[in-house]
């Protein structure tokens, strides 16, 4: 027998849906504006170029390193500390590559097409000479990595394709498993999470590389999983409480899954936070993207996804099982 729902939930999440969705819209617009104005700080995975890791005897001044490289003929170098104050990571744009690296007009030789080992050795020598002009700060080159511009372009295209296909897959899966209004709510909530990550990386100009892209794809799956759990409970309660109001059933469902959502998010957050603090520079931005995704994804699973589905007009009739016809009354 169908039960009648009562307001036995503790938190009225959907009662605050206007404020929550409004806040999400404002933050999403701010993230989009930042993307257009500041853009993303793409690492050489996407732009092409050279990464040089140098170790000093004494902690160096990053501005002095940039000046030394520009004086030596390298245009637009960037330098940052890498793990310790004595280790510096230097990024050189494609046109700064040694021995006639790609020029702005694209007519110069590509070191990949030649002997890459010789090109890197020459670049290593030039950078080492530039960094050792001050005898008080002796530098040792420990790593040189080169990514060609064409490789960067291919990675950019593949990354965009991966995001588009993942989004389409989510849309189709949720529409097949639930209902198209739930599907739109889930995909908008997931896109909300992605936009937040892009916006924060754009605003703070954090390095955006392949590891960050991998984190975004992981966040899409993580956020969707949380949303699916909530939607599953909503569907169960729609069929259990046939006389309740839609907003009450959704609120009850969110409250029932809240402890599971918060516990999963907290444990995942602690793990990723440890990666961000002690994992080193290689996975630092990967962990930062996951931290943002976990926090925003948990918020969107609770406040955004269900609120959007409700706004799109989902009703109890959309998920109810059809009543059996022709039932025989066996009562005396």
Image: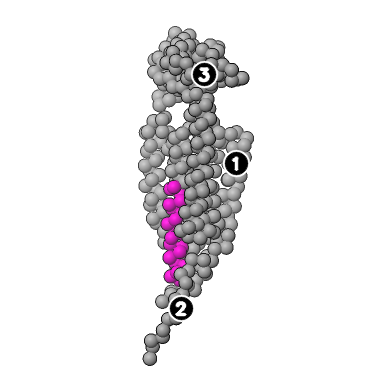
Give the alpha-carbon distance from disc 2 to disc 1, as whole Å.
Answer: 52 Å
In the image, residue 15 lies at what x, y percent? Answer: 54, 61
Is residue 85 shown in magenta? no
Estimate how packed mark 1 is, as few (under 14), some (14 to 19) or many (20 or more) residues with alpha carbons within 10 Å: some
> What secondary structure prevails in the magenta region?
helix
Task: Report which residue position mark 3 lands on.
Answer: 110
Q: Decide which of tag 3 and tag 2 comes sooner along the chain.
A: 3
Location of the N terminus (image quadrant): bottom left
Q: Is residue 207 above or below residue 54?
A: below
Task: Report which residue position mark 2 lands on.
Answer: 325
Give the alpha-carbon distance from disc 3 to disc 2, as whole Å.
Answer: 74 Å
Which one is nearer the viewer's eye here, 201 or 134? 201
Estimate how packed mark 3 is, as few (under 14), some (14 to 19) or many (20 or more) residues with alpha carbons within 10 Å: many
Q: Residue at x 49, y 32 (%)?
A: 155
Q: Is residue 193 visible?
A: no
Mark 2 or 1: the one toward you = 2
Q: Secondary structure at mark 1?
A: helix
In the image, residue 229 lies at what x, y percent? Answer: 42, 57
In the image, residue 242 lies at what x, y percent? Answer: 47, 72
**Disc 1 vs disc 3: Cβ atoms closer than 8 Å?**
no
The residue segment tinted magenta is: 221-241
Which one is nearer the viewer's eye here, 199 or 20? 199
Q: How is the image coloured?
A: one colour
Q: Residue at x 44, y 13 (%)?
A: 118
Label for residue 32?
A: 1
Q: Is residue 139 above or below residue 238?
A: above
Location of the C terminus (image quadrant): bottom left
């Amino acid at each position: 027998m169908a039960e009648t729902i009562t307001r036995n939930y503790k938190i009225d999440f959907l009662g605050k849906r206007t404020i929550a969705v409004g806040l999400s819209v404002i933050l999403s617009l701010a993230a989009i504006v930042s993307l257009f104005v500041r853009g993303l700080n793409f690492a050489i995975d996407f732009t092409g170029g050279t990464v040089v890791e140098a170790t000093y005897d004494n902690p160096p001044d990053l501005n002095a390193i940039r000046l030394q490289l520009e004086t030596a003929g390298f245009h637009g170098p960037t330098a940052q500390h890498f793990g310790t104050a004595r280790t510096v990571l230097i990024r050189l744009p494609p046109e700064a590559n040694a021995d006639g690296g790609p020029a702005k007009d694209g007519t110069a030789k590509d070191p990949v097409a030649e002997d890459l080992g010789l090109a890197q050795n020459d670049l290593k020598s030039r950078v080492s000479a530039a960094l050792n002009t001050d005898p008080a700060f002796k530098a040792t080159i420990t790593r040189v990595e080169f990514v060609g511009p064409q490789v960067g372009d291919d990675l950019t295209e593949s990354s965009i394709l991966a995001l588009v296909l993942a989004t389409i897959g989510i849309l189709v899966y949720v529409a097949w498993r639930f209902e198209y209004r739930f599907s739109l709510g889930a995909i908008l909530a997931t896109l909300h999470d992605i936009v937040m990550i892009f916006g924060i990386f754009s605003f703070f100009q954090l390095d955006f590389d392949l590891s960050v892209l991998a984190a975004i794809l992981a966040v899409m799956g993580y956020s969707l999983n949380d949303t699916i759990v909530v939607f599953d409970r909503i569907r169960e309660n729609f069929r259990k409480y046939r006389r309740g109001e839609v907003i009450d059933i959704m609120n009850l469902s969110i409250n029932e899954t809240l402890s599971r959502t918060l516990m999963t998010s907290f444990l995942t957050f602690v793990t990723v936070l440890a990666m961000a603090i002690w994992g080193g520079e290689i996975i630092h931005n990967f962990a930062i993207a996951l931290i943002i995704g976990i926090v925003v994804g948990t918020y969107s699973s609770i406040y955004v996804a269900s609120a959007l589905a409700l706004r799109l007009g989902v009703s109890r009739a959309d998920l109810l099982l059809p009543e059996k016809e022709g039932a025989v009354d066996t009562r005396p």
